[in-house]
Amino acid sequence: MSSLFIDGQQCPASGGQSIVVHSPVTGEVIGEIARGQAQDIDLAVNAARRALNGRWGQQSATDRGRVLVRIGEAVLRHIDELADIEARDTGKPLTLARKDIEALARYFEFYGGACDKVHGEVIPYLPGYSVNVVREPCGVVGHIIPWNYPAQMLGRTLAPALAMGNTSVLKPAEEACLTSLRFAQIATEAGLPAGVLNIVTGFGREAGAALAAHPGINLMTFTGSPAVGVAIQTATAANHVKCVLELGGKSPQVVFADADLDKAVPVIVGAIIQNAGQTCSAGSRLLIQREVFDQVIERVAARFREIRVGLPSSAPDCGPIITQAQFLRVNQFIQECKDSGLPVLAEGILDDNLPAGGYYVRPTLFGPVPRTHKLAQEEVFGPVLAALPFDDEDDAVALANGTDYGLVCAVWTENGARQHRLAKRLEGGQVFINCYGAGGGVELPFGGVRKSGHGREKGLLALEEFSITKTIVFHHG
Ligand code: NAI
Ligand code: MG
């Protein structure tokens, strides 16, 4: 059984209980993780507080940056091992797992280099006064991350927090936490002092809820479902703690009649099937100008029929879904769409001889989907694409903005003026013109509006989220 990681040490959960881990590839039991609870969260928060008041809290930004950069280098030295753990734990293709570990390293390199470039302001004020605004750590940060990109989420939330001099308690998802636990050892070997990063594995409703409600937390960050986002905000409200929340989306890919389809089609399909559709920023709605609807669908469908679902080691387009629960959820969604009479335009291929107990879902393209249909409004979190026609630019904007979510949008058009108009009118944290996702982009601020959450991660802006300012006023006459 794997352990918790508190104050630089591996330790068992105080209740001695565990959670069984299943392989997404075969459905078989492959291990156990420690089932941390409120007492363990308490120990972890106390350790993080001591570390904040210790060496970590006193050292210069330059020295902190050096530690982060060394962690990034250490991750790259262990890339084969970490990619293997990540692929085994999540079922994602090994090729994708490797990119995710590279991104984990990149977060530490980026924020390691950035942390000693953050400085304050001098504000001109009344005669006889000098005013400085300085930026300080929030204190102890609570992080709750999901299972779809465990390594990337770890880097995205942890690296900027540590860069600003905070200390952390992280609750990884019970479905996939092995990379986080191995990372903690590697980071410690690379020079991260004890107590700066503490990891408590366990169930969301136990360890996760205890972390969000802990009065010793000064900032809370969460990525996952909107319902749990509400629970976390409610818990932190009692302690007057700020939350950074990223809660998924129903992101539109808007294709105008003048789009360059040779470029667009592979990107459109990639944006929904990456990680078997289990991506917060998946491009799950394909909005197509009516006059080219059939033509675009024909090309997208042809590509969909080539999507191969297979073992993570076989470089497939999609691996299995993470757990049996998510597998059933996604399949039920697909079945409901079929039962409601939605036309199936194309389906992908399941490799022969896949293990019978694994969680393999057939990628499916539906359309035309009515605007009010569940599939046009709700996140599936699987390899399912909904195609909808629109008439003109105004209609495209209304349709694209017409869900509760607002995370990412993409526009395909060769008309430059329209590109600019759409970029202004689409609601979301990122808009891509003639591309999608830009390869993850550690440098690019990311986050949502409405039900997709609030706050910004990634890029230099994350350093503002993970710190607070103090205004210091001197009266010297
Ligand atoms: P979830 O929101 O329940 O889980 C995400 C994380 O929150 C996990 O670490 C979990 O242990 C923790 N958690 C769960 N309940 C909690 C609570 N009461 N208090 C504190 N922490 C808690 O998401 P789940 O059940 O894994 O997936 C359900 C759906 O959520 C997916 O189908 C998808 O639509 C969405 N989702 C979105 C993600 C994103 O990247 N935005 C990631 C994962 C899920
Ligand atoms: Mg849940």
Image: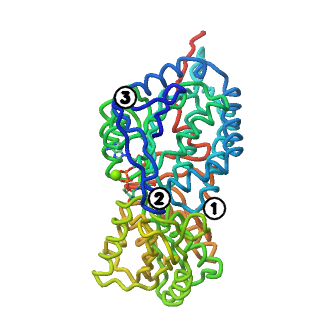
Q: CA distance from mark 1 to mark 3?
A: 37 Å
Residue type at tag 2? Cys
Q: CA distance from mark 2 to mark 3?
A: 33 Å
User: Camera-side residue: 185 or 273?
Assistant: 185
Instruction: Find out if the beta carbon at label 1 lies less than 8 Å from the nearest ligand 1 atom.
Output: no
Left or right of 373? Residue 423 is right
Image height of 61 relative to 362, above or below: above
2 vs 3, front mark: 3
Question: Mark 1 — residue?
Answer: 95
Residue at position x 55%, y 71% from top?
411
Q: Position of residue 469 (x, y in %)?
A: 53, 28
Q: Is residue 441 visible?
A: yes
Question: Mark 3 — residue?
Answer: 14
Residue at position x 53%, y 55% from top?
88
Neighbour class for label 3 at 10 Å: few (<14), some, many (≥20)? some
Residue type at tag 3? Ser
Circle on res. 403: none
Neighbour class for label 1 at 10 Å: few (<14), some, many (≥20)? some
Question: Mark 2 — residue?
Answer: 280
Quadrant of the rendering where the C terminus is positioned: top right
Instruction: Find out if the beta carbon at label 2 lies less than 8 Å from the nearest ligand 1 atom.
Output: yes
Residue type at tag 1? Thr
